[in-house]
Image (tube, helix red, strand yellow):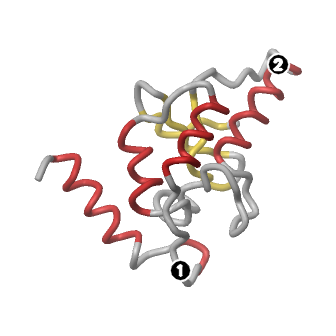
Amino acid sequence: MTESEQLLTQVETKARTIRPWGRTSLPGPVDAAALTRAEATLGFRLPARLAELYVRTGDAGFGPGYGLLPLLDSPLSSEPAAVTHYLANGASGRKDPGWPWPEGVLPISHWGCASTHAWTAWTAWTAWTA
């Protein structure tokens, strides 16, 4: 088993037992077609491990802060889906150049008080306040 496989297995195990906001179940995984639609909408591919989390583990509700944001839809969350969040942040940044949202930086988890964890195709950002 590779290091990446071990990490994904550990996340899956923890995700099935610990959920923020008292959710009773983990949303089902994202299918390959939804992942392809999300990447086409974003204009870039998700990093491999992040894509694997969505495809293998579930579409939100586990992870840091208040949990991973849903990828495309957010029926179980008051937060917008990651793709929606990314597009809205980009539009907001174009309206207010003083608060630009960097291209290719996908919000993946909300931490409260306008603090969002974001992931780029290159590295994970510990906290990006938007």
Q: Could you say which quadrant of the image residue 9 lies in?
A: bottom left
Assign a secondary structure to mark 2: helix
Q: Amino acid at mark 2?
A: Arg
**Tag in front: 1 or 2:** 1
List x then y, in percent, for residue 90: 75, 27
* Residue 94 numbered mark, or none: 2
* Residue 25 numbered mark, or none: 1
**Would residue 59 be found to the left or right of residue 72 on screen?**
left
**In the picture shown, does residue 26 fall above or below 84?**
below
**Would residue 26 be found to the left or right of residue 47 on screen?**
right
Which residue lies at the image location 52% right of the left edge and 56% below the top edge?
30
Nearest the eye: 125 or 85: 85
Q: Looking at the rendering, in which quadrant would you find the C terminus?
A: top right
Assign a secondary structure to mark 1: loop
**Would residue 80 be found to the left or right of residue 119 on screen?**
right
**In the picture shown, does residue 60 fall above or below 103?**
below
Which residue lies at the image location 54% right of the left edge and 60% below the top edge?
59
List x then y, in percent, for residue 10: 26, 63
State the separation of the CA atoms marked 1 and 2: 38 Å
Residue at the extreme bottom of the image, as rendered? 24
List x then y, in percent, for residue 61: 55, 66
